[in-house]
Image (cartoon, rainbow, N blue to C red):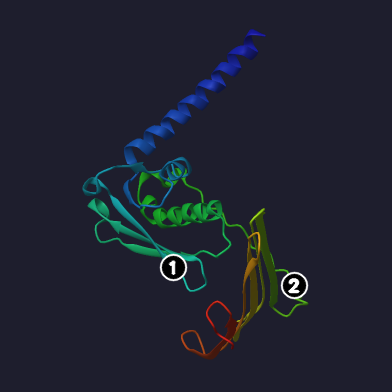
Amino acid sequence: MKKTSLLVLLLLSIIIAKSQEDSSTIRNYAPKIFLDCNSCDMQHIKNEISFVNYVRNSKVADIHILISQQRAGNGGSEYTFMFLGQQNFEGKNDTLKFVSLPDNTSSEIRDKQIKFLKMGLIQYVSHTKLIDLIDINYEKSQEPEVVVDKWNNWVFSANSSGWFRGESSYTNINVWSRIEANKVTEEWKIEFDLSNSFSEAKYIFPDETISSINRSYSGGAIVVKSFGEHWSAGITSNAGSSTFSNLDF
């Protein structure tokens, strides 16, 4: 029993010593980085990327990382990572980019940011004594599953809403509805929409009732043909009527 306890203590001592050795190596030899990003989750980045030293002064950093974000044409955002080498890495610069999808969650975008930060930092870390502590793994991508779209890229949606309120001398009803049909491919962008609204207000007096009715209808269409990555041509049309705006058609 005593031998088993001594063996466990010895193994724990070795593990602790190894952990302390790795921590000391990271503390003494890891590059110092200054992260310049207004929209990043700094605490999450520090938790996920622990093989660098973080500094608050860009002048003492070995790597100044500037992360910017701008709206992308697909409705998502384009993220740019600029790695600017300083000190011993002077002149060793790099730029990485990725574009998020409109339906990406904040967690998915955050994970992608971590991935690109790691990929950009590896070229600097590989020139330090930390190279013995770094492993690179490759996850083989699976063959994409072929999905047959029975709707041929068409997306249909319908919305409707309404409300009613009233009292003994006043009532008001309002109803609104809209239907849309959209198709977006590499070659075409087609959109159709129809909407209508109805509202009626009644003012009830002892000897008469005054009623005010508003109706409106509208429709629109967009058809665009692509001629490559940068050019397209199309037409758009709109039609409608509104009693409130005194428009017959």
Q: Sequence order check: which comes first, mark 1 or mark 2?
A: 1
- Give the quadrant of residue 145: bottom right
Q: Residue at x 54, y 91 (%)?
A: 235
The N terminus: image quadrant: top right
User: From what the image shows, is residue 73 above or below residue 207?
Assistant: below
Residue 238 visible (yes or no) = yes
The C terminus: image quadrant: bottom right
- 88 left or right of 68? left
Q: Residue at x 49, y 25 (%)?
A: 16
**What's the residue type where badge 2 is placed?**
Val
Q: Residue at x 66, y 55 (%)?
A: 166
Q: Residue at x 60, y 17 (%)?
A: 7
**What's the residue type where badge 1 is placed?**
Arg
Residue positioned most to the top: 2
- 42 left or right of 9? left
x and y, in percent, of residue 68 in the image: 37, 60
Task: Quote the CA–CA distance across marks 1 and 2.
Answer: 29 Å
User: From what the image shows, is residue 27 above or below residue 131?
Assistant: above
Residue 226 visible (yes or no) = no
- 31 left or right of 170? left
190 and 74: which is toward the camera: 190
* Residue placed under numbered mark 1 in the picture: 71
* Residue placed under numbered mark 2 in the picture: 147
- 82 left or right of 11? left
x and y, in percent, of residue 141 in the image: 64, 63
3 and 105: which is toward the camera: 105
